[in-house]
Amino acid sequence: MNKYLRAFISWMKLIMANEVAYKGNFILKVIALIIFDFFGPIIALLMYSVSSGIPGWGFEQYLLMVGTFTLVWGINDTFFDNLAHGLIHLLRQGEFDITMLRPFKVLGYWTVTAGNPRQSFRILSGLAIVSYALLSFNSIVFVNILSYIYLIFLATLFMYSINVLIASLAILFVKSSSLIGIFENILSVGSFPLTVYGPIGSFIFTFVFPLGIAAFYPAVALIGGLDLILILKLTLVISLFLVGNILIWSFALKRYTSAGG
Amino acid sequence: MSVRDSFLQFKGVFKMAIKDAIAYKFEFVIWMIAHPIWLAALYFVWKAIYAYSGVDVIRGFTFLGFINYMILATIVGTATWVGVDYRTADEVRRGTLIRYIVKPVSYYRNALYSNIGWRFFAFSFESLPIVIFAIFFLGLTTTNIYFVLFTISVILAFVLNYTFTFIFGLMAFWLVKIGGIIRVRNGLEVLLKGFVMPISFFPIWFQKVSNILPFQYVVYVPAQIFLQNFTLLQSVVSIVIQLLWIVVLLTVAKIIWRRGYIRFAGVGM
């Protein structure tokens, strides 16, 4: 078995054992996760009960987007929850150097030991919201489902890139977990249809900082189908975004001064 | 204890908290950027919603009124945020709470003064840019009398939120880990305080439930006072209710503290 896969499995087992050590606390954390995950649908419900809602988006369509956003966050938190957070903690403690002594590439090790199985409940919440929204659709074209799954994969790569970027910025500039807060706020912008931000906003959030992939494009693909050319363009943009952030990571690692503690 | 002694204690802890906060100034600078991003997103989304709905007012809020409410909710939320629950739980778990026996100031007041220092610094960094933007570009303003009432309401909201959060921290006397409970509370609070939307946007039954709980007096009520969506009488009555809630919660906190402290062995790790 590949050593990275072994490390991933060991890490997930370890974290799970740690989480369930205090069972009552674990259950409450899961309940809290679910409460937060259902904020999106609650807000959507309120929006559509007091107004006509977002132009061009019916309630169920918007709910599908909200569910997709939750699903993508769930995948991110299940597999990369600790990537930026854990690294920032170690940087502050001055213990990041230990990572470099391990028989792994630094980013590879961080990637496979960043997950938290508790967060998989967010994936279930996302799937539940998406499924509920889909009940109101008469039929879904099979090709659209495939597009949706593929775009969720791209969204996962995008979220991973963001984590790598935060970790790099933490090494280069600020060893602060508030960096994560900033990116969470930026990513929240992607929980609404890009159309509300106008043509310039849509262009920026598609081709410059592609957060439209986090929910908007997968939802559009599932509802009405997405042009193949646009899917290819998104693939190219996300690939470049990922490569760019890995290069930033390499740059940051070379400038690591081991000055924490 | 004289008023002068209390003031000197406050001054000492406050100054120390400010020095601590300065060490974390980058954290606050980062939030100074993060808040406007979210508010900008809300601006675009609700602008589209109001235009699409073809109405000027939704549940008592014009578009500008709604945006100003969300700005005020962010500002009041920043001013009243406290982390005393985690701090208290940590002190209990580590056993370090024992040191407050020999101090001339109670743990409740020590942590309160410290929180005031932190919030004073954090508020200046995180909220001032939003306040300046809202005043000059969105015309966020109020009359002198409402500003005075708003200021009183925010101060009381801080004490109310602090005391309520403190009670949750005291649960650590009975439970080893309270992170889960705190997260559940945080989740419910976000809705009940009126952070994500004004309480008037919620169904009537939710508003009725909210009326008998203390949460809306932390964010929703001060924001409504500033926006003059409450009459002067309503504002004064709301402030009196805030005071009553503080008295009730302080009494509960004292009872729990006494019972919990009896159990506390001063041992921890």
Image: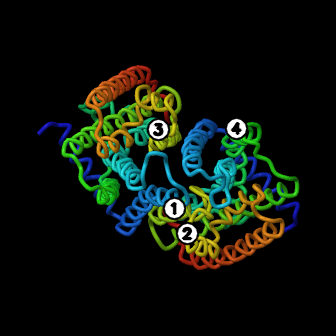
Identify the residue at horizontal 52%, vertical 28% (top origin).
A173
Q: Are marks 3 and 1 on the same chain?
A: yes
Query: Dot 4 lies on which element?
Result: helix
Q: Amino acid at mark 1?
A: Ser
Residue B203 numbered mark, or none: 2
Query: Dot 3 lies on which element?
Result: helix
The Cα atoms of the two marked residues, 3 and 4, are separated by: 28 Å
Q: Which residue is mark 1?
A: A49
Query: Dot 1 lies on which element?
Result: helix
Q: Are marks 3 and 4 on the same chain?
A: no
Residue A195 numbered mark, or none: 3
| Discs 2/3, front | 3
- x%, y% of residue A210? 40, 31
Picture layout, residue B261 above or below residue A249: below
Q: Amino acid at mark 2?
A: Pro
Picture layout, residue A115 above or below residue B153: above
Count residues near mark 4 (Cα–Cα under 10 Å), then give few for <14, some for 14-19, many for 20+: some
- x%, y% of residue A66? 40, 51
Identify the residue at horizontal 44%, vertical 45% (top origin).
A56
Q: Is residue A63 left or right of residue B108?
A: left
Q: Is residue A152 left or right of residue A189?
A: left
Q: Are marks 4 and 1 in contact (CB under 8 Å)?
A: no
The Cα atoms of the two marked residues, 2 and 4, are separated by: 34 Å
The Cα atoms of the two marked residues, 4 and 1, are separated by: 33 Å
Q: Amino acid at mark 3?
A: Thr
| Discs 2/4, front | 2
Q: Earlier in the sequence, mark 2 or mark 4?
A: 4
Q: Are marks 3 and 1 in contact (CB under 8 Å)?
A: no
